[in-house]
Amino acid sequence: MERLEGQVAIVTGASRGIGRAVAKELADYGASVVVNYNQSPDAAASLVDEITGGGSKAIAVQANVGEPAEVNSLVEKTIEEFEKIDILINNAGVNRDRTIRRMSPEEWQEVINTDLNSAFYCTNAVIPHMIERSYGRIINMSSIIGQMGNVGQSNYAAAKAGLVAFTKSAAQEFARYNITVNAMCPGFIETEMVLALSDEVKEALLAKIPLGRFGRPDEVATFCRYLVTEGDWITGQQLNPNGGMYMY
């Protein structure tokens, strides 16, 4: 398998869950990783220690990627430290679950801004550096919810579906520069959010997954790593590690 020595990756929302697993996977294959976080400095620092202890380079950078000025600062710090950007994983996200009738405008806007707008802000900031070098790999972390919807998650579903459409347009724009853009649409993964559900809810979800179990963050991370090491002819796609829960 192709290694990632000499490549630099930014992973947003990397302090926990899928983002943490992706950052660790890329580092294990030799990439230097910028661990972005917003409110979890200790978790980000522990990941940096884990990565550097394994022989790869990493720094933690605090930035709310829903704010363009903070995104620009994140990219500037990456260039100062590593001089280039090869890989961008737009993973940062929040959920504020509520039915449409009860959802406030603030709850709608927070999810749209963090889960969707941030992908534009980050892509917009890194793309000049990728175009300059005629190389880049961008992965947008969407969700099965963006494909099939879910009660009480209209804001989250809209944001994640928007990421898929954004991916398709960006892939067409940047293909001429040898930059691929893909969307990852995981099903229900063993993260804090899923593990916190009641046993009754988890059993109901498992009954809908043909493979009979939740996914693991490292399985999604492996898929992401494949795209940046082996997926040179894959762009504009939505890839679906979901245990067969949603097929189309």
Image: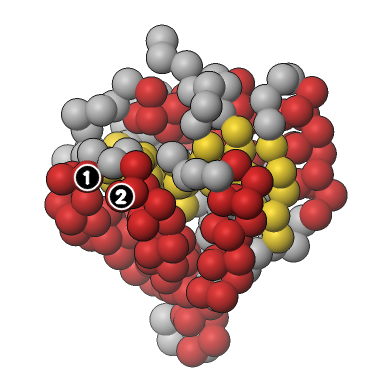
Residue 144 in percent (x, y) is at: 36, 48
Quarter that holds the C terminus:
top left
Identify the colour scheme used.
secondary structure
Instruction: Evaluate if marks 1 and 2 touch, with contact meaning CB atoms under 8 Å apart.
Output: yes
Tell me which corner region of the image, top left, top right, bottom left or bottom right, holds residue 216: top right
Which element is circle 1 on? helix
Q: In terms of depth relative to the viewer, which is nearer, 145 or 51?
A: 51
Tell me which corner region of the image, top left, top right, bottom left or bottom right, holds residue 178: top left
The mark total stands at 2
Residue 120, placed above or below residue 81 = below
Q: Which mark is residue 177?
A: 1
Residue denoted by label 2? 131
**Would you say 119 lies left or right of 238 here?**
right
Neighbours of disc 1 within 10 Å: few (<14), some (14-19), many (20+): some
Q: Amino acid at mark 2?
A: Ile
**Would you say 35 lies left or right of 226 here?**
right
Is residue 99 visible from the viewing direction of this image?
no
Tell me which corner region of the image, top left, top right, bottom left or bottom right, holds residue 160: bottom left
Q: Name the residue located 56 percent from the left edge and 51 percent from the top edge.
A: 79
How far apart are the two marked residues, 1 and 2, measured between alpha carbons? 6 Å
Quarter that holds the N terminus:
top left
Q: Name the residue located 30 percent from the left edge and 64 percent from the top edge.
A: 162
Which element is circle 2 on? helix
Residue lying at the far top in this picture: please name it. Answer: 1
Q: Amino acid at mark 1?
A: Tyr
Residue 142 in percent (x, y) is at: 39, 52
Q: In terms of depth relative to the viewer, which is nearer, 43 or 160?
A: 43
Which badge, 1 or 2, is on the more N-terminal residue? 2
Q: Name the residue located 72 percent from the left edge and 20 percent from the top edge.
A: 55
Is residue 126 visible from the viewing direction of this image?
yes
Residue 190 in percent (x, y) is at: 59, 37
Q: Name the residue located 60 percent from the left edge and 33 percent from the top edge.
A: 32
